[in-house]
Image (cartoon, rainbow, N blue to C red):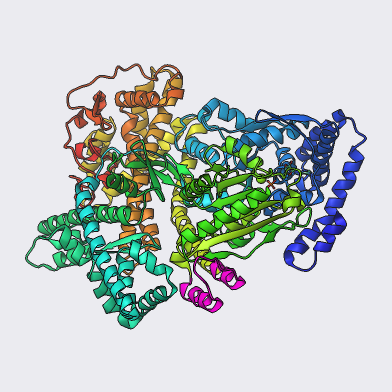
């Protein structure tokens, strides 16, 4: 074996990397030989011995050879005794001893890199080596799988080794209780999916109110299986815990019917143009036809006639020519004019829709400007420049302009989302409608994603379009991107069959190197050139013929599709031909895993979207190798080459025979949007393509790959972009989460409380003392209303000066508090102190997240200006965060003495958390009661009592909206002044 590996290894850096590890492989194998004479007891005792060494400061690297040898030897013993292991209800005999390449894979994982190992190379087993080694530290190793089924399977299967060697293994599953989860994390090793890990982190840090509520115990080392799928495909959507917002501001139902009319108008227009183009083609005027069709493409890219013309290389070229011509710099004005000839334009590549003057007029004939964002900067400038108006008048005008601006951007945002919903998002492709709900179809996997919603109002727009109930806009309660979650780990590693094409991204974003491990046995798979067809119909017909032919011979086939929809079309066609087959959509993981496992049997035809059955091994049954092994057919090239490689890799594992081929057509999305159609059309003419017949040529493969590279690049940019924005949030999240953890874990929450109060006092004094003359009355008023200090004016006067004032206030606030809690149960007081802090942080942080969402939207609108949106975003986000911190401190001060209202809020809080309700008496004896003019909390306006100390605050505040100016500080919007919103009363207003 070593000899074979050595032969493979010459030259490249990757190969040198692998070669460097060979001496260690030898060492491990030697050590393993030495272990064979031990009893099982003695082998098991090694674990304790390793732990002892680690405790004495020995490094993991030093222990690696012997630890790997122990795992390998354990596998050997299992194999020899043919140990049967119950895995997901089935008895599986253990029959694997790590190969040398697997040992190398294990070392790569231990070193914190990605091991690229082809499908079927036994990565599940590979992971046990570094997992065992690192788990010896007791710090907890996390093994991340793509679904719950695989987590359970691997924990049971591989768990046998760990348990035998004296380590504990846990497994996270959806729906486990908090106590169960904590138990899983307490194990030396924990298997689970990335969303289970990520959501636990968010709950631990964004919601837990006591350390006992937290389930995780740190982020030491994670090994991610199918790492490309998780860090690249899944990473495009962050993990979000959300709840409904209190006030909903959308106007989707209001504009829906007008947009429908608009779309109808536009479609009519485009169909007319397409028909005119047809006449022109018939008259031989290709140039004219091309220009017309280009317009159709701008206005209605999925127009039937247009799609038909795109199939024909001649007209397609004419369209491309027209497009190229129009995008020349000198033709800019003409392009704008063209765009003004229709109601709106669609950019399918970026899935954007843009309303034109004509469209605006159609929607509101009286005032086309109704749909334009006012230029706030110019307006404000004009207001300032007007000598006639006084300061107050100017302020009023500015406020009006601001309100106007907000309203217009909301309106435009709604309209453009509706347009996208109608023109870019297609039912049964991008989403399905089930039980009166719009459910997203994952574009990568074809899976239905119930519960996931498009952000930014798009989901609601689609709901409006489909006439189903428009669900309330949700508000982010806690969020993190997958990228930032995994960056928490001290050490990260991953494994997959396909990492190499994405090596740059792994390096840039995760600082993960990729090492390609040679296969245990040479791969003999035959990859045929792509077969290219003009139309989808022709492609599918040819595909069915091929399936019929191979099926008749008994060869098993795996047909990979890009979407649920195309799986179903192929299934229908096969049914018509009476060919038995299985369809998998990555929905029922366990069941599908079982079907996929049998995909290598004689005569099996399995249709699967690309995620279905990932991680399940396809073994060939007897007689199948002689037929050529498993044949894999791709029905479409995916946007990313990696996914295609992944599909091909499903066959020809461990030296088995196997073959693969892709079928593509010009109507595939990839080709329509990113294909270099001119080149390909040229090639096709050159190579002499006949109708109804597929064309095959290495040149074509290269063209397709170029298109894929282009999309990969673009998607990478999108992910990077998401991350750049999330980085800003990440810093803020780190500050808030670590503050929260301090509060949760401290034995002395009062200290935290007073630190916060002191900072608030400091800021307040600085502000009041900073004016000329010093605002003594203001300070007095604040001190006595925010806190029940009963301070006299003379006391302040006598103290004189900033520092003495601060000292005075700090002293008095402590005295007041002592008095207040003197007769209370100290444990209860502690709980309340924690709650005062956490309540303020959580509520305002959530508001802050909402405001940050809004900031992102408005920043994108601003991108039309000259500014770099990211820099703007950073600047404003920073400002908002500073404000947030001040507001939290302010709220802590206010809540500290409002025992009654705090108490009842505390009650609410506990009631809202079912697992926590059992946790004992309420901290204070005060009876909550509703008094007149109480402060209302939450959307339901439930009344709560206000403590005597707060008597000056008792009043029925006006109900203000988030965007109303704060009555105290008209320069600030209500939502930014103290964080209150909806039916809540602004505390500043009341004070
Ligand atoms: P991968 O995740 O790399 O695609 P799996 O971990 O699913 O591969 O393993 C594929 C198959 O190879 C499994 O059936 C497993 O039992 C088998 N296998 C793995 N390692 C060995 C080994 N060292 N010797 C024999 N069979 C092995
Ligand atoms: Mg696997």
In the rendered view of the protein, which quadrant contains the C terminus?
top left
Q: Within the image, what quadrant is residue 907 found in?
A: top left
- Is 902 magenta? The answer is no
Bounds of the magenta segment: 676-705
- Residue 713, image x, y percentages: 51, 65
Rendering quadrant holding ligand 1 = top right
Q: Is residue 510 left or right of residue 425?
A: right
Image position of 275 with respect to 766: above or below:
below
Residue placed most toward the observer, 475 or 684: 684
In the image, what residue occupies the spot 47% across and 58% down? 537
Image position of 321 with respect to 80: above or below:
below
In the rendered view of the protein, which quadrant contains the N terminus?
bottom right
Q: Main secondary structure of the magenta part?
A: helix
Q: How many marks?
A: 0
Residue placed most toward the observer, 499 or 28: 499
Image position of 919 with respect to 90: above or below:
above
Image position of 473 with respect to 668: above or below:
above
- Residue 586, image x, y percentages: 54, 42
Q: Is residue 409 visible?
A: yes
Q: Is residue 329 left or right of residue 825?
A: left
- Residue reaching furthest to the bottom: 330
Residue placed most toward the observer, 718 or 51: 718
- Is 700 magenta? The answer is yes
- Residue 12, image x, y percentages: 74, 67
In the image, what residue occupies the spot 57% across and 45% down? 579
- Residue 511, image x, y percentages: 61, 57
Q: Is residue 164 left or right of residue 548?
A: right
Q: Is residue 105 visible?
A: no
Residue placed most toward the observer, 968 or 560: 560
In the image, what residue occupies the spot 17% across and 31% down? 955
């Amino acid at each position: 074996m070593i000899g074979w590996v050595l032969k493979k290894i010459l030259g490249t850096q990757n190969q040198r990397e692998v070669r460097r590890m060979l001496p260690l492989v030898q060492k491990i194998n030697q050590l393993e030989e030495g272990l064979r004479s031990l009893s099982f007891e003695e082998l098991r005792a090694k674990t304790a011995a390793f732990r002892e060494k680690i405790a004495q400061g020995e490094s993991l690297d030093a222990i690696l050879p012997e630890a790997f040898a122990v795992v390998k030897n354990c596998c050997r013993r299992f194999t020899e005794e043919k140990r049967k292991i119950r895995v997901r209800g089935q008895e599986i005999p253990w029959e694997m001893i790590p190969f040398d390449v697997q040992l190398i894979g294990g070392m790569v994982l231990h070193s914190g890199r990605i091991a690229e190992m082809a499908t079927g190379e036994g990565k599940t087993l590979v992971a046990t080596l570094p997992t065992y080694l690192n788990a010896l530290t007791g710090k907890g190793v996390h093994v991340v799988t793509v679904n719950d089924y695989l987590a359970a399977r691997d924990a049971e299967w591989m768990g046998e080794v760990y348990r035998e060697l004296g380590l504990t293994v846990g497994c996270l599953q959806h729906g486990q209780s908090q106590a169960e989860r904590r138990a899983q994390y307490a194990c030396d090793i924990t298997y689970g999916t990335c969303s289970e890990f990520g959501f636990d982190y968010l709950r631990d840090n964004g919601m837990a109110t006591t350390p006992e509520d937290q389930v995780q115990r740190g982020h030491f080392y994670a090994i991610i299986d199918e790492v490309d799928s998780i860090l690249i495909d899944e990473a495009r959507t962050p993990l979000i815990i959300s709840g409904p917002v209190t006030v909903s501001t959308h106007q989707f139902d209001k504009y829906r019917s007008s947009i429908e009319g608009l779309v109808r108008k536009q479609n009519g227009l485009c169909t007319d143009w397409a028909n005119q183009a047809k006449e022109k083609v018939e008259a031989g005027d290709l140039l004219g036809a091309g220009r017309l069709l280009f317009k159709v493409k701008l206005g209605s890219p999925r127009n039937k006639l247009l799609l038909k013309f795109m199939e024909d290389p001649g007209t397609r070229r004419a369209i491309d020519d027209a497009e190229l011509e129009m995008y020349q710099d000198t033709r800019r004005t003409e392009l704008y004019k063209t765009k003004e000839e229709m109601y709106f334009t669609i950019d399918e590549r970026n899935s954007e829709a843009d309303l034109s003057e004509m469209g605006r007029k159609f929607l509101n004939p009286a005032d086309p400007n109704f749909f334009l964002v006012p230029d706030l900067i110019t307006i404000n400038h004009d207001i300032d420049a007007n000598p006639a108006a006084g300061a107050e008048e100017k302020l009023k005008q500015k406020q009006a302009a601001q309100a106007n601006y907000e309203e217009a951007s909301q309106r435009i945002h709604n309209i453009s989302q509706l347009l996208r919903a109608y023109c870019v998002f297609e039912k049964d492709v991008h989403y399905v409608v089930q039980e009166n709900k719009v459910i997203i179809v994952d574009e990568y996997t074809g899976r239905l994603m119930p519960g996931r919603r498009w952000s930014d109002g798009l989901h609601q727009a689609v709901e409006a379009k489909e006439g189903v109930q428009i669900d309330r806009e949700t508000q982010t309660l806690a969020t993190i991107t997958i990228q930032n979650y995994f960056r928490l780990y001290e050490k990260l590693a991953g494994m997959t069959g396909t990492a190499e094409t994405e090596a740059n991204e792994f390096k840039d974003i995760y600082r993960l190197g990729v090492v390609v491990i040679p296969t245990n046995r040479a791969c003999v798979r035959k990859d045929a050139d792509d077969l290219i067809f003009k139309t989808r119909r022709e492609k599918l017909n040819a595909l069915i013929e091929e399936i019929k032919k191979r099926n008749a011979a008994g060869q098993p086939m795996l047909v990979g599709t890009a979407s649920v929809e195309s799986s179903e079309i192929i299934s229908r066609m096969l049914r018509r031909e009476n060919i038995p087959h299985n369809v998998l959509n990555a929905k029922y993981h366990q069941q599908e895993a079982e079907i996929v496992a049998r995909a290598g049997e004689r005569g099996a035809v399995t249709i699967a979207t690309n995620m279905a059955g990932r991680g399940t091994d396809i073994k060939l049954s007897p007689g199948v190798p002689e037929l050529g092994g498993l044949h894999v057919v791709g029905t479409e090239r995916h946007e990313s080459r990696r996914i295609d490689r992944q599909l091909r890799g499903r066959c020809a594992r461990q030296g088995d025979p196997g073959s693969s081929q892709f079928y593509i057509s010009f109507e595939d999305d990839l080709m329509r949007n990113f294909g270099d159609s001119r080149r390909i059309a040229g090639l096709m003419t050159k190579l002499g393509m006949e109708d109804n017949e597929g064309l095959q040529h290495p040149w074509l493969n290269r063209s397709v790959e170029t298109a894929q590279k282009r999309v990969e690049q673009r998607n990478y940019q999108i992910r990077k972009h998401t991350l750049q924005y999330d980085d800003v949030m990440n810093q803020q999240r780190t500050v808030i989460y670590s503050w929260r953890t301090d509060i949760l874990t401290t034995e002395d929450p009062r200290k935290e409380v007073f630190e916060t109060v002191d900072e608030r006092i400091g800021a307040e004094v600085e502000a009041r003392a900073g004016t000329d003359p010093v605002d003594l009355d203001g300070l007095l008023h604040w001190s006595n209303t925010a806190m029940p200090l009963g301070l006299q004016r003379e006391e302040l006067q006598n103290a004189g000066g900033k520092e003495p004032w601060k000292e005075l206030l700090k002293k008095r606030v402590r005295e007041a508090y002592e008095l207040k809690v003197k007769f209370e149960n100290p444990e209860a007081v502690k709980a309340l102190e924690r709650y005062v802090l956490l309540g303020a942080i959580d509520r305002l942080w959530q508001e802050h997240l909402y405001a940050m969402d809004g900031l992102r939207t408005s920043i994108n609108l601003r991108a039309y200006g000259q500014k770099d949106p990211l820099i703007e975003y950073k600047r404003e986000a920073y400002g908002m965060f500073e404000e947030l911190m001040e507001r939290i401190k302010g709220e802590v001060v206010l809540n500290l003495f409002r025992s009654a209202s705090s108490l009842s809020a505390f009650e609410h809080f506990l009631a809202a958390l079912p697992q926590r309700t059992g946790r004992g008496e309420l901290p204070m004896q005060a009876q909550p009661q509703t008094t007149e003019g109480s402060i209302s909390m939450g959307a339901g306006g439930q009344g709560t009592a206000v403590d005597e100390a707060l008597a000056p605050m008792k009043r029925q505040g006006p109900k203000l909206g988030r965007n109303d100016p704060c009555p105290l500080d008209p320069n600030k919007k209500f939502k930014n002044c103290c964080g209150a919103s909806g039916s809540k009363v602004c505390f500043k207003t009341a004070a």
